[in-house]
Image: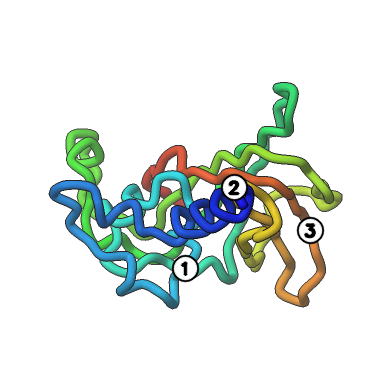
Amino acid sequence: MLRIMLGLFLILVSQTNILAMVPNCRFDLEDYVDQSWVRKLENPKSVFNLFDRPPELRSLEILQMQRKDMGYDSVRIAIILRQIPDRIPKRWSRNNVQSVKAIIMTLHIAGRIERAFKKALPISKANISMEIEPETIPQTLFFKITSETGDELFSMRDSLVRIERFVPYEW
């Protein structure tokens, strides 16, 4: 009986919008159901500091990937987002950045690598997907990068994903 009650409690907690409990929270993630990848980040607010509507994770260019072994797999992936941000951070303005044509988003992913990149970087026209793995407690992600033809290029299980930083991209 205790196991059933604990299971129901964990399901209830996992379905609760924690951000709705944060005071002075400027956005409601319910408005972004079509951009549900943001919900799966450890730090979703970082996206809304730049964008009113989160960018799609389609036809991206992956610039670099850095892997570290820390007792678990840890990967940093730098991605070019072509969507122009709605707001330029003050720290960019201090560095004389007046307009932005694209930005680099660096993701930090911790988990277990299932498939590593076999192609040389950079890779253009890649798609990113993040799917919740309901059988894990706490719930974790299956993070996957595919080519535009649907071939799997990289994947990680039991993942935690956070945005490490956004920087302006000049080409």
Mark found first going from the N terminus, 3 or 1: 1
Which one is earlier in the sequence, the residue at label 2 or at label 1? 2
In what element is the residue under mark 3?
A: strand
From the viewer's perspective, is the residue at label 3 or at label 1 nearer? 1
Q: Earlier in the sequence, mark 2 or mark 3?
A: 2
Tell me what residue is drawn at x 65 percent, y 46 percent: 159
CA–CA distance between discs 3 and 1?
22 Å
Q: Amino acid at mark 3?
A: Leu
Residue occupied by mark 2: 2
Residue 1: x %, y % from top left:
62, 52
What percent of the width, then of the height, locates residue 97?
24, 44
Q: Residue at x 42, y 66 (%)?
A: 55
Q: Mark 2 and mark 1: span between their CA atoms?
A: 33 Å
Q: Which amino acid type is shown beneath numbered disc 2?
A: Leu
Q: Residues within 10 Å of mark 2 (few under 14, many from 20)?
A: few
Which quadrant of the view contains residue 33?
bottom left
Tell me: 18 left or right of 129.
left
Asked which quadrant contains residue 20, the reply is bottom left
Give me the residue at 21% from left, 56% from top: 87
**Residue reaching furthest left?**
24
Foreground mark, 2 or 3, reads: 2
> Is disc 3 surrounded by few (<14), some (14 to 19) or many (20+) residues within 10 Å?
some
Q: Secondary structure at mark 2?
A: helix
Q: Which mark is residue 14?
A: none
Residue 36 numbered tag: 1
Residue hosting label 3: 153
- Report x, y in % for residue 19: 30, 53
Q: Is residue 75 above or below residue 149?
A: above
Q: Is residue 143 left or right of residue 6?
A: right
Query: Between marks 2 and 3, how big is the CA–CA gap?
Result: 43 Å
